[in-house]
């Protein structure tokens, strides 16, 4: 998993409540088990017409938001079904951070397992960041995971909270497999001892 420490990039405003995982990546794109290639279908039904043409008033179809690394979203982002393809699609598009007042629990957990930082802020801070992101002349925001701050374009910083274990995993690029591999010596020692004491197993 890619490490996350600091991120500076375009923030896209997505001021919609209850964006569910089917909106993030519709069900017809769930046939793959690959984590790559889903970015082109991120928010597919909002980005494209039925014949595949771009819907020009959707934020990610406009510059500079085509290169968005951060999304500032409405309440309850990532609700609905528990598809892990949702963070895969965001990551493949280039989004490494989503800022909202609240997230659905499963989506929130899946973000950390895929190297995406979901940040919970107050309604006032979210509204300020939404206004910043809506300024297409200067929508760049900086996120510092070590300091746990978001720097707005005007230089004002917003602090956020994060579980220390999840912070460590993001900083070190550790997903579930990486965490297991950190214990590889202990696992090997246990297997050797069990083989010696219980060779019939």
Image (cartoon, helix red, strand yellow):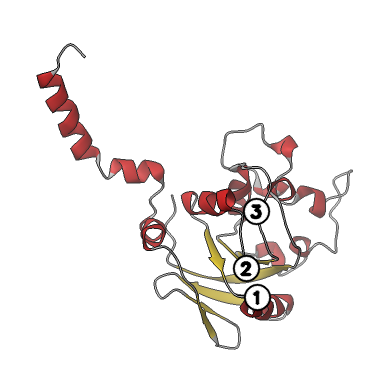
Q: Residues within 10 Å of mark 3 (few under 14, many from 20)?
A: many
Q: Based on the displayed image, in which of its 4 quarters is residue 28 positioned?
A: top right
Dot 2 and dot 1 residues touching (CB under 8 Å) = yes
**Residue pointed to by mark 2:** 101
Residue 123: image location, x then y, percent: 65, 75
- Which quarter of the rendered picture does the C terminus lie within? top left
Q: Based on the displayed image, in which of its 4 quarters is residue 66 positioned?
A: bottom right
Image-based side of 25 in relation to 186, left or right: right
Separation of marks 2 and 3 at Cα, in angstroms: 12 Å
Closer to the camera, 49 or 101?
101
Look at the picture and state if 161 lies above or below 53: below
Closer to the camera, 52 or 109?
109
Which element is circle 3 on?
loop
Closer to the camera, 66 or 197?
197
Look at the picture and state if 117 lies above or below 105: below
Separation of marks 2 and 1 at Cα, in angstroms: 6 Å
Which element is circle 2 on?
loop
Q: Residue furthest top?
A: 200
Q: Residue at x 53, y 49 (%)?
A: 110
**Residue pointed to by mark 3:** 78
Disc 2 or 1, which lies upstream in sequence?
A: 2
**Residue pointed to by mark 1:** 123
């Amino acid at each position: 998993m890619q490490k996350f420490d600091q991120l500076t990039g375009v923030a896209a405003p997505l001021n919609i409540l209850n964006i569910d995982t089917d909106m993030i990546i519709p069900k017809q794109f769930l046939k793959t088990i690959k984590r790559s290639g889903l970015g082109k279908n991120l928010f597919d039904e909002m980005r494209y017409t039925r014949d595949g043409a771009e819907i020009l008033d959707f934020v990610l179809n406009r510059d500079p938001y085509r290169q968005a690394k951060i999304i500032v979203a409405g309440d309850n982002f990532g609700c609905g079904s528990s598809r892990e393809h949702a963070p895969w699609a965001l990551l493949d598009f280039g989004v490494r951070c989503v800022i909202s007042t609240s997230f659905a629990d499963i989506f929130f957990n899946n973000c950390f397992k895929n190297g995406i930082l979901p940040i919970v802020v107050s309604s006032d801070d979210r509204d300020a960041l939404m206004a910043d992101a809506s300024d297409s002349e200067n929508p760049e925001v900086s996120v510092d995971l070590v300091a746990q701050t978001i720097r707005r374009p005007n230089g004002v910083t917003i602090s956020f909270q994060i579980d220390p274990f999840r912070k460590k995993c993001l900083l070190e690029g550790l997903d579930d497999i990486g965490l297991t591999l950190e214990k590889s010596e202990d696992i090997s020692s246990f297997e050797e001892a069990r083989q010696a004491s219980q060779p019939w197993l």
